Image (tube, coloured by chain):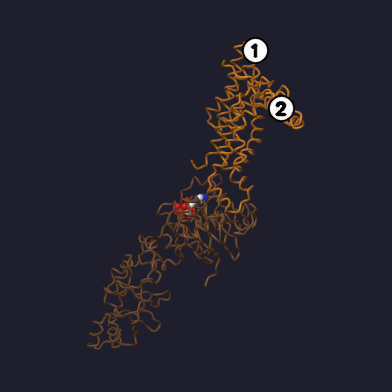
Amino acid sequence: MAKNKIKIEHVSKIFGPKPKSVIPMVRDGMSKAEILKETNHTVGVYDASMEINEGEIFVIMGLSGSGKSTLIRCFNLLNKPTDGAIKVDDENIVKYNASELRKFRQDKIAMVFQHFGLFNHRTVMENVEYGLEIKNVSKEERQKIAQDNIEIVGLKGFEDKYPEELSGGMQQRVGLARALTNDPDILLMDEPFSALDPLIRRDMQLELLDIQERLKKTIIFITHDVNEAFKIGDRVAVMKDGKVVQVGTPEEILESPANEYITDFIADIDRSKILQAENIMFKPNALVSLKDGLKVAIKEMKENGISSVFVVDRGRHLKGIVTIDAAIKGVKEKKTLEDVLDTDVSVVKKEEYVNDIIPKALESKFPLAVVNEDNKLEGLILRVHVLSGLVADDVEESREYHGYMQNNEVNE
Amino acid sequence: MGNFPDIEFKLGDYVEDFVNFLDEVLEPLFDLIFFISSRFIGAISDVLTWIPWWVFIILIFLLGWYFKSILSGVFYAVFIFLVGTFGLWEYLMMTISIVLTAVIICLVIGVPIGVWMAFSKGFSSVMRPILDAMQTMPSFVYLIPAIFFFGLGNVSAIFATLIYALPPVIRLTELAIRGVDPEVIESAQSFGSSRWQMLKKVQLPQALPTIMAGVNQTTMMALAMVVIASMVGAKGLGEQVLISINRIDIALGFEAGISIVFLAIIIDRVTGGVADKFQKHRRAK
Ligand SMILES: Nc1ncnc2c1ncn2[C@@H]1O[C@H](COP(=O)(O)OP(=O)(O)OP(=O)(O)O)[C@@H](O)[C@H]1O
Ligand SMILES: [Mg+2]
């Protein structure tokens, strides 16, 4: 289990002249709109609690105005919470004095902004080295580190350009390099890719995942785009009207949305790009080993009411598939299991996205075999399941349409 | 009867008392200001008169070329040459010294005040009416306390010029600092900048183009004060205009007048050009 890096405990942020006075009202259940009308205070975030693990990408998503920015800005105290505690490495940062806060910001946390927040009077290099310059690192050393990070984000050769001379995507790379240069433990990203067009955004997402793979930061990432959230988030928090309504892995949220709001939210999501093969496969409880022979195969199929069964060797490596028809015919003709084995099975990896296995599912005349990284058989996917994974309804229903594995337990 | 009743409030007397009081109490300060600014003007005019005339013309050409275009450079050089042919070279140098000194002092005083106003709402609301008054009060009025504090001469002229020309640089500095993109401020904060680092490395550089626009305005206003300031004994082109008025000398009046116009054009274009250069790498907002 990964270690907790950040713990948010009952954090509230209220905007207005006397924010503390409003807390009891929210506690008594007054809505955000009522409070605004009666007291002229805006509830930015109310009673948010969550734990963020070291090295994970934690996504906060929600509609516009739901308080995402307000919350993320509490992490580096650009917003000072009205109430609650924020513990980073078990220290409550809300209690920091000015110099402790400066130190914390210089060493532990960095932020990437939606509209980049670049210094347009400085070149790319000067932007990237800014954080170190603030810490009085010598020019030589900071430029060396800055150069490394400029290369990490793929901006080599642009060091002396001004931000204005770069495209949006490149500007955000500068923002990312600038944040990385401080080598922070925690990276805050407030809708960093929202201002970019879709193609560039996709590249940047992939690149972020790539960089994360290497650097293993704790990343808090904000987006209002569900697809983006589920694509890059290890875990996702959903916010509504200043409250955190659900926290979980993308699969957990997809499988059991906490309420209507989340259901609506994920309605337009393209599930095929989030769900992986392992999310829609089930475990074969009928499996036949090569040495078992034809008779056993027929028995297994009959007992389980299925029309074909996968055949594996002792190490659970897939050998092929045998259908009930071929098996019965084989017994009559005194053939062995190996003789009637059909090896024309489509194999997919556990972590392949459903989106990517659609073509295979459409072509294959048998169920797809799902294997793990050691090529061991883990499960199988029916064609209909691939397609039903695309519509928002549950996978379970579709099972009834298909007589294939009716009696099987489903691996969830 | 429509006569105003016999009620008297001698505001002017009180102001006079106040100025007297200031003169007494702040004498050391005024002496210091006098000392510094007279030295300053002296130094600048020494340098300007030491430079050979043709070097100066080439410098003007280069300035025009660098900040505007080669054609502008040629024009400016011709302008300056013409002033020389009018026999007004020394006066031109004197005027430039006074204007330069006034502008530099304006910046030294004005930028910090503007920055402070940007940071403090209270200070800003106190300063605003004062700045309004400074700008709308007829500029002749400043001449009186100026003479009182500094006697006749260039320093009085600078003092009067300062009061008149200071507001734009203060206002534009405040505006510029307040106008820095909040996301940029936040990004600087998020890296743990101290207040001073923020001001020095982010806010002032970001504000510079706008501040330069203020410098341009301030310079033009300082130049506009040249003739008026000559009434308290400022030397230079303004003095020549004043003399020509007294003597009803159309020729001298025109030559001195057109020289001031030439100078105004050059200063305006060059400082404007400097502002543009600063603007170059900025987002159009
Ligand atoms: N500085 C502020 N002063 C007053 N109210 C604020 C302030 N900042 C945010 N709010 C209010 O807090 C609420 C949450 O805003 P926030 O910016 O956190 O939303 P968001 O989820 O980031 O939305 P978006 O997707 O549009 O960025 C909004 O009602 C907003 O008006
Ligand atoms: Mg936001």
* Residues under numbered marks 1 and 2 in contact, where contact means CB atoms less than 8 Å apart: no
| Whether residue B33 is visible | yes
Q: Which chain is brown?
A: A
Q: Is residue B257 above or below residue A52?
A: above
Using the image as rendered, state which of residue A212 and residue A252 is in the foreground.
Answer: A252
Say which quadrant the C terminus of chain A sits in: bottom left
Q: Earlier in the sequence, mark 1 or mark 2?
A: 2
Asked which secondary structure carries label 2, the reply is helix
- Give the Cα distance between marks 1 and 2: 30 Å
Horizontally, residue A337 falls left or right of residue B145, namely: left
Q: Is residue A194 above or below residue A381?
A: above
Q: Give the amino acid type for the residue marked by disc 1 in the picture.
A: Asn
Asked whether the residues under marks 1 and 2 belong to the same chain, the reply is yes
**Chain B display color:** orange
Counting from the top left corner in percent of width and height, residue A143 is at 60, 53
Specify the subunit that label 2 lies on. B
Residue identified by numbered label 1: B246
Q: Count the marks: how many?
A: 2
Q: Nearer the viewer, mark 1 or mark 2?
A: 2
Residue A313 circle label: none
Counting from the top left corner in percent of width and height, residue A232 is at 45, 62
> Which residue is outermost to the front?
B1
Using the image as rendered, state which of residue A298 and residue A141 is in the foreground.
Answer: A298
Residue identified by numbered label 2: B19
Horizontally, residue B232 falls left or right of residue A196, namely: right
Q: Give the amino acid type for the residue marked by disc 2 in the picture.
A: Val
The picture quadrant where one finds residue A265 is bottom left
Counting from the top left corner in percent of width and height, residue A307 is at 26, 80
The picture quadrant where one finds residue B200 is top right
| Ligand 1 has an atom within 8 Å of the beta carbon of the residue at disc 1 | no
Q: Is residue A325 above or below residue B80?
A: below
For label 2, count other residues whose C-alpha is less than 10 Å away and answer few (under 14), some (14-19) or many (20+). Answer: some
